[in-house]
Amino acid sequence: MLIGRKKEQKTLLSLLESQESEFVAVYGRRRVGKTFLVRETFDYKFAFQHTGLQNANKQEQLKEFHKSLKNSGMKKIPTLNDWSDAFSALGDLLNSLPEGKKIVFIDELPWLDTPKSNMVSALEHFWNGWATSRKDIILIVCGSATSWIISKIVKNYGGLHNRLTRQIYLEPFTLRKCEQFAANKSLGMSRRNILETYMVLGGIPYYWKFLQKEDSWAQNINRMFFRKNGELRNEYNALYSSLFKNPEPYMEIVAALGHKKVGMTRQEIIDATGKNQGGKLTKILEELEECDFIRSYSSIGKQKKETVYQLIDNYTLFYYKFIADQKINDTDYWNKIISKTVYNVWSGLAFERVCFWHIEQIKQALGISGVISNVFSWIYKPENASESGVQIDMLIDRDDNVINLCEIKFSNSEYEITEKYEKELRRKADVFKAKSKTQKGVTTVMITSNGLKRNQWANSIQRQISADDLFV
């Protein structure tokens, strides 16, 4: 059953009513549910369906395409020497079918684009020279290599320029959609369980399907990650290899970012990895951002060269904290560390990342959904020994002349503001106003996992948001 994709499904179904041929790109990171969306929407009924092979050469890809033509009912298939032959044969197959919409679904299209294969130019000719002269073709291409889809299809400046009639970027689930998923699977999870699971898995439906209702939250995490053959223990390498043809440089950058709470500048990344790759580094950073692994932001008063890159993918963050370079095979490991410092440090950081995935929900809780705003973190490094640094987890710079300084805190119960912490919050606001020289009003917002404990110090907080507000 398809859950949480009503808008995307409505878009796909509308293609059946179109009076012209339609070319659609569905993209998003590995395991987010692209293939499942397309197949479920059209009840697994296609005029032609094909899936590219990972790490296969052109001859192997064409051989598999030949099989797909045969599986689709084509009797006499010519020899496929190149992709022009392959798409010409596909046209012949579609010509032989009865009247009515003909849905063509090519999954993992980027894998077909092997070196010197000319696959993209053949696809351009198939669409421009054949499909657009008809009114009955629905061509849906799909791929986990988001950066490839964007550069070769969505932003193609050659023969496919502006040829896409629809594009669907499939985002990870929100907490609300994960709650719907858990209810549909009868997992019996509380919102606390769902939040903590999201802190580990992010909103990737494929990862959530491994949760078993017979197990507790901790038992599920132990089984998936800390058992020798856990379902997600070795997902990391497969994830990055599926997205990037040469994944090592991407993984090096992600590894460096995995150890920095507020992120790193370009120069700090170069210093950490020991590689100054010039334009190549720019491309890697752009592609990591397109795939939703990192985000970039520039703080108030900062120059472009001071742009900060921050890891926001919860699964990757969890991997670097507990899996990478560790040989843990203790199937009760998660239960044992829940009260330890390493867990507390990770949970604070992971909850912060969850909040960044739910910016729209936070804006709604603040009543500013219709206000244009920029969201980033902010850090001030002391210029001399007499000063102390300041770090603000989330800053919402609004067009209605207000800036929200958001403090994000994860705790097992209501978070208690002490006199000391209240003074620190005031100091942060004062330093921010002085160093940013902003003329806007500045207010402090507390975002907590379980709300604030009422006391005299909590009264100084202008607004508070709890995890429940993120589930809308």
Image (spheres, rainbow, N blue to C red):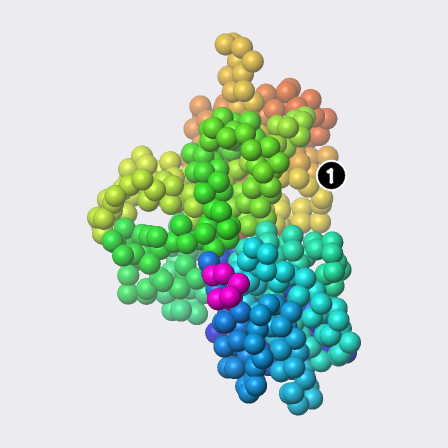
Q: Is residue 344 visible?
A: yes
Q: Is residue 12 visible?
A: no
330 over 79 or under it: above or below: above
Q: Which residue is mark 1?
A: 400
207 over 430 or under it: above or below: below
Question: Where is residue 291 drawn, in percent x and y?
Answer: 55, 50
Residue at the spot 62% in from the left edge and 46% down from the top edge:
363
Question: Where is residue 295 drawn, in percent x and y?
Answer: 57, 41
Question: Where is residue 7 drawn, in percent x and y?
Answer: 62, 66
Classify residue 436 by image quadrant: top right
Question: Where is residue 449 drawn, in percent x and y?
Answer: 44, 45
60 over 350 or under it: above or below: below
312 over 128 or under it: above or below: above
In the displayed structure, does residue 328 sit left or right of residue 343? left
Q: For the stretch drawn in magenta, what is the main secondary structure?
A: helix
Q: Secondary structure at mark 1?
A: loop
Near-viewer residue (34 or 354): 34
Q: Residues within 10 Å of mark 1 (few under 14, many from 20)?
A: few
Q: How many marks?
A: 1
Q: Is residue 27 magenta?
A: no
- Figure quadrant of the C terminus: bottom right
Near-viewer residue (37 or 423): 37
In the displayed structure, does residue 434 sit left or right of residue 65? right
Classify residue 34 by image quadrant: bottom right
Q: Amino acid at mark 1?
A: Asp
**Magenta-colored span:** 56-61
Residue at the spot 59% in from the left edge and 51% down from the top edge:
147
Residue at the spot 75% in from the left edge and 71% down from the top edge:
129
Residue at the spot 57% in from the left edge and 86% down from the top edge:
76
